[in-house]
Amino acid sequence: MIKKLQRKFIVIATLSVFAVMLVIVGGINLANLYSTNRQIDLLLALLADNEGRFPPYDFDDDDDKLYPNEAALRLAGLSEESRFMTRYFVARVDFQGKIFQLDTSHIAALSSSGAQKLAQKALANERSSGYIDVYKYLVTGKPYGKLIVFLDCRERLAAVGRVLGASLAIGISGLAVVFLLISVFSSRVVKPVAESIEKQRRFITDASHELKTPLAIVAANVEVLTYTYGDSEWTKSIKNQIKRLGELIDDLLVLSRLDEQNQSMPGKVFSLSLLAEEIAEPYRAVALAKGLNFELYISPKIGCRGDEAGIRRLVSALLDNAFKYAGGERRVSVKLAKRGRWAVLEVFNTVDEPGSFNDEELGRIFDRFYRSDLSRARETGGYGLGLSIAKSIAESNRGTIAAKRRDGGLAFVVTLPFASVQP
């Protein structure tokens, strides 16, 4: 249990750090991408407004500005040097959609024919802006038709990729370091919980053993009274309560032992089909006596790897529970089948009030000493430990158990590791 708790802590803490890093890394790269794209758009707009040329740049003359939004251009990193660093070409198109002029003097990576093909693709896209390979274009209307400005963005996109790669590498490395630190120090975090659970387990074991002695003395005294004065209503009641207390002590000891068990997979393989049939068969007579409709749907050759004695007790506990609380249509059924890597056992019983089990009750139904209907639990002699024991057995065998509302009743679904068995 402690190891499982420690693993959950490591996973949750690591996922939390991963989520934070994802937000940080994603935010940095999105901001970088937005800034780069913004710079590209401003540069395209500048060239388009000036017929594919950089305008004169003079800080001393307020009337001769680079662009109406000069502050934005400076924030985007554009300056007088940009005219020498920017690779671009322009295409002029008439109203019939024909390219009548290409200016490729500011780019060396494309020939005139290559530039013409890109311009034709941009016209075919019928969009005012977009990317074609590593080139972003902007189409603007002019008195003669259209002006298409293409900007070579490979260096800018490569810079974005380098920032992305570096941030991912740093993020993954940081996450690995955090995971190692959490793994190393997680034992200290769960140590108080482990100590508390150990004290609780020791208390249950010690108290159970201490209770057995006075209980045995009371039982012996009742036998002497019965032998001396004969059996009576009072001695029968005492014997009944002694039996119930003995069963409660045994259940507490079973839970304590299950908590102490190692979570490693037991190595024994056995036939779960034969085990379920063997346990369910005696209940046919009980169903007949109580007027219940008892059905078995057990697939053959379903094997399981685990603790046979424990799983036997699990199946018995679920059947006992189903027969105790069967109501409504008074149906009980047991199904066993293989689903992928799992053997799935389902024990179902109808109830008097199907809507009485809400989500909160289903979530607490496996809690120790929890009973959804106290009056009926007293009538059936339950302490609310049977389903807790069933859950502990399922988990100790690397399985799961769940309660579900279905067809006017309650179904307990157990999944256990499947293993092949000889026919």
Image (cartoon, rainbow, N blue to C red):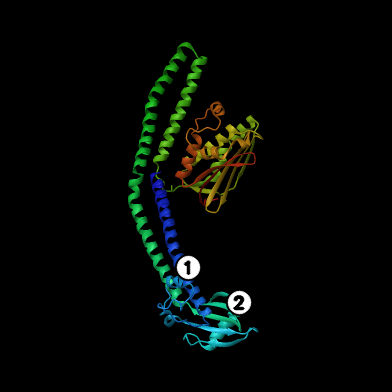
Q: Quarter of the image for the N terminus: give it.
A: top left
Q: Quadrant of residue 250?
A: top left
Give the residue type that dot 1 points to: Tyr
What residue is disc 1 on?
34
Mark 2 against mark 1, which lies toward the viewer?
1
Give the residue type that dot 2 points to: Asn
What residue is disc 2 on?
125
- Residue at 54% across, 26% down: 378
Q: Quadrant of residue 212?
A: top left
In the picture provided, is 188 more to the left or to the right than 99?
left
In the picture provided, is 333 more to the left or to the right than 260?
right
- Residue at 34% across, 47% down: 187
Residue 215, percent across and down?
41, 23
Q: Which mark is residue 199?
A: none
Q: For mark 2, does the 10 Å Cα neighbourhood hold few (<14), some (14 to 19), or many (20 or more) residues?
A: few
Helix, strand or loop under label 1:
helix
- Residue at 42% across, 56% down: 20
Q: For mark 1, does the 10 Å Cα neighbourhood hold few (<14), some (14 to 19), or many (20 or more) residues?
A: few
Is 164 rendered above or below residue 284?
A: below
Q: Nearer the viewer, residue 236 or 55?
A: 55
Report the residue that reaches farthest toward the right: 329
Confirm whether residue 126 shows in the render: yes
